[in-house]
Amino acid sequence: MINNDNIHHLNFEDKKITLIGTAHVSIESADLAQKVIEDEKPDMVCVELCESRYHSIMQKSQWQNTNLLKVIKEKKAFLLLSNLMLAYFQKKIGQKLGIRPGEEIVRAIQAARSVRARIYLADRDIRTTLSRTWRCMGLWAKIKLLFQLVSSVGEMDNIKEADIEEMKKKDVLEMFLSEIGKSFPEIRRILIDERDQYLAHMIRTSPGKKIVAVVGAGHIPGINSYWERDIDLDALNQIPPKGKVFSFLKWGIPGFIVCLIILGFFYAGSSTGTHMIKWWVLANAILAGLGAAIALGHPLTVLSAIVASPLTSLNPMIAAGWVAGLVEVFLGKPKVKDFERLSEDISSLKGFWKNKITRILLVVAFTNIGSSVGTFVAIPLMIKVFT
């Protein structure tokens, strides 16, 4: 049972702030948040949500405004897919526990409206958090993350009582990235420490004199520790540039491949050069096509992945997954009903392949993974032919 240890009273300048630490999957937390707001009758209620997460909870029709062409062209397909995967896990947990994860936030918003308090979104945009996390991960860590998310699906039906108690202590975003976070401390810093700073700053500078803030209990120690410190909000919102190693590999690998083929023709003869090109084309085409096929892309989408991959792998500005994804958009032509059914379809793993929206995102992700793996498979085969 949640007790008053979860309620903290803070001051900042002339503001009085009541900070409530909640469990994200607990009916007791939802009751506590509602009761405190109704009793305190604040003029401002801060919640641990960003604008996009707020709309996903309060506006069920938000997906109808998604521009898939724009998502693919802006290279945000994986970020959107990751967001939907997290939403899937939320739904599965809710089915297990009999409560919607984040119910305490919904109840806090409803209570705020009932006492005519304003609502203030205090969390950092999830897209910024995911982008900062994404930039600090290497290629294999990214691939590991995607497959870890997918493999975790099968484990959802084997949740034990001890696992449920652990879930009550964590944010869903933190929970499903925690395993990778053990190997990459930088990820923990971005997911938890940075958000502690962000929440502390947003809560203490929010409009109003009497404020109630509802956040996950795991953020309370961090918020308290940063409460009196100076916080650079611009730095927390900045998307870091791609690393020099990434930039080098982005241009260096295609350059190396081209040089290798040229050397094959000049120093080992046209037959060797031709065989090197053959292995390059086969490795890229087969694995990219396999990725598109695993995503259940249209046959022409699979063909586009096969044709595009050997060429796009030599062009750092274009990816095979983007080509295949755009082809799938034009061939699949998602309808309004696909957007309307999205929330329901992501309740099951099968629904990710059934719904045209998520299938397009899977096509982009799996084709890009297949093409990347194909590049690393082709290189040793080409070197072997050359030597």
Image (tube, rainbow, N blue to C red):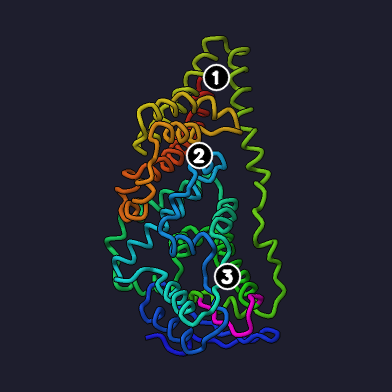
Is disc 1 placed on a helix, strand or loop?
Answer: helix
Is residue 373 visible in this depiction of the protein? no
On the image, which quarter does residue 93 sit in? bottom left
On the image, which quarter does residue 353 sit in? top left
Foreground pick, 221 / 100: 100
Question: Residue at image x 48%, y 88%?
Answer: 5
Foreground pick, 348 / 336: 336
Foreground pick, 284 / 216: 216
Which image quadrant: the N terminus?
A: bottom left
Q: Amino acid at mark 1?
A: Phe
Is disc 3 placed on a helix, strand or loop?
Answer: loop
Mark 2 is surrounded, within 10 Å at the Cα level, by few (under 14), some (14 to 19) or many (20 or more) other residues, namely some
- Give percent across and percent down for residue 358: 39, 45
Q: Residue tagged by mark 3? A: 122
333 left or right, relative to 43: left
230 left or right, relative to 52: right
Is residue 267 visible in this depiction of the protein? yes
Mark 3 is surrounded, within 10 Å at the Cα level, by few (under 14), some (14 to 19) or many (20 or more) other residues, namely many
Give me the C-alpha separation between circle 1 and circle 3: 58 Å
Mark 1 is surrounded, within 10 Å at the Cα level, by few (under 14), some (14 to 19) or many (20 or more) other residues, namely some
Is disc 2 placed on a helix, strand or loop?
Answer: helix
Q: Residue tagged by mark 1? A: 386
Q: Amino acid at mark 3?
A: Ala
Q: Earlier in the sequence, mark 1 or mark 3?
A: 3
Whether residue 220 is situated above or below residue 77 in the rendered picture:
below
Q: Nearer the viewer, mark 1 or mark 3?
A: 3
Numbered badge on residue 121: none
The number of callouts visible is 3
- Residues in magenta? 205-214
Q: Residue tagged by mark 2? A: 69
- Give percent across and percent down for residue 357: 40, 44
Give me the C-alpha separation between circle 3 and circle 2: 30 Å
